[in-house]
Amino acid sequence: MKKIGIITHYYKSTNYGGNLQAYALCKYLINEGYEAEQICYPIFKPNVKIRVSNFSTFLQLIRSLISHFIFFPHHIYYKTSKSKTKKAFENFNLSIIPNSGKVYNDSNFNECIENYDVFITGSDQVWNFSFFRPEYFLESIPSTISKISYAASISMKSLSDNQQEYLAKVLQDYKSISVREEYAKDLISGIVQKPIYKVVDPVFLLSEAEWNDLAYDYRIKDDYIFSYFIGNNNNSREICRVFARKHGLKIIDIPMANNQYRFTGIQIGDIKATDVSPNEFLGLIKNAQFIFTDSFHASVFSYLFKKQFYVFNRNHNGDMSERIIDIMSQFGLLPYFCDDSSKESIEYVTSLPIIDYTKLNDEVVKTNIDNSKRYLEESLLK
């Protein structure tokens, strides 16, 4: 039996999508008869020091003091909320998701080499150079050991010459390479002289029944709108608030995204939920009347649970919208991505018909899932 080590944005992550995709890939591989686990590797480098000038340090101190004085009540709330969020994730992240137990870092990562027959990097934004870490490219793993990428995401529309040169170097040893988005496939195809496959996010590898079993009901009995925004687009929040008022529904909002409180001009939510586990996150989507979000994974689970949902740009400049366009196109629901000023309005949202899932052609999604499973099967046999 092959033992597979997976490296992704997993260890102590407080990101819902990151945890659920990490769980899904392990679970699917185990279902297929492999021994698979996530490698415990910190997402961000600890104790990174940035040198700044004395004047910059002074300005930073002044801004910090002003912010602390003005937002003191918010800081108290933030500290309490962060603690609740962290606790809500702990069991799922470290107990439910199979993992290495031992925590590796940049200095000792090569110690895990002897533990695995195959290394997989992905999914999620492991190849986003905005937060570059060489281990996500399996740079230190020797070419004699099988290396695979699964649904690696770049979330960048273009790459610099140095980035292209780096990818050409590190990916030449990979047995198989797959990415999550079409534009990422196009980017890498021009860099690496190997087949590049587009596959589905790991959460698609599990059935709706498996996700249903994992979903826990949150502590609310009333009908509600589930609001989950990661970015700072206030228009989307205002539309959600007006929509809720029109339909006489409460809003459950998760104000902590990746354990960071989002201070925006508009605060929404009749219930601000800061103690939501990944299991309850699934339950909040599964049981909602409507979902308003700018999250890729919240959009995917809304589709998998056959919910009514509306997706918005994360920021006003449309950053990271390519992957939403890609997935909503596959769903046949691109009009439900409100990605420009003409669509970012309550008039547009209320003009959209209720999604009739019995009439959606899901053959594209089913075919992509089958092809992705075949990719994994064939890659693991190489």
Image (cartoon, rainbow, N blue to C red):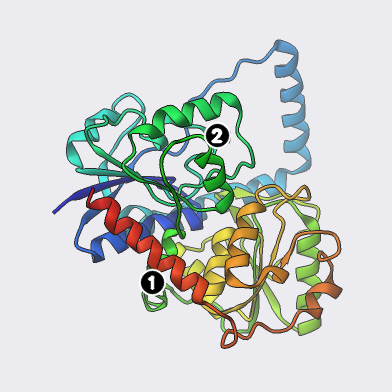
- Give the residue drawn at x 54%, y 28%: 163
Q: Mark 1 points at which residue?
A: 214
Please state the horizontal and vertical placement of residue 362, each as a whole percent of the image.
Answer: 52, 77
Tell me the quarter of the picture where residue 247 sits: bottom right
Please state the horizontal and vertical placement of residue 292, each as a whole percent of the image.
Answer: 68, 68
Q: Is residue 57 visible?
A: yes
- Give the residue drawn at x 45%, y 39%: 43
Q: Mark 2 points at which residue?
A: 129
Tell me the quarter of the picture where residue 175 sits: top left
- Give the residue drawn at x 62%, y 66%: 328
In the image, farthest residue toward the bottom: 358
**Residue type pointed to by label 2:** Phe
Secondary structure category for the residue under label 1: helix
Residues packed near mark 2 inside 10 Å, few (<14), some (14 to 19) or many (20 plus): some
In the displayed structure image, the side of residue 341 where residue 303 appears, left or right: left
Please state the horizontal and vertical placement of residue 334, each as a whole percent of the image.
Answer: 68, 68
**Which quarter shows the N terminus?**
bottom left
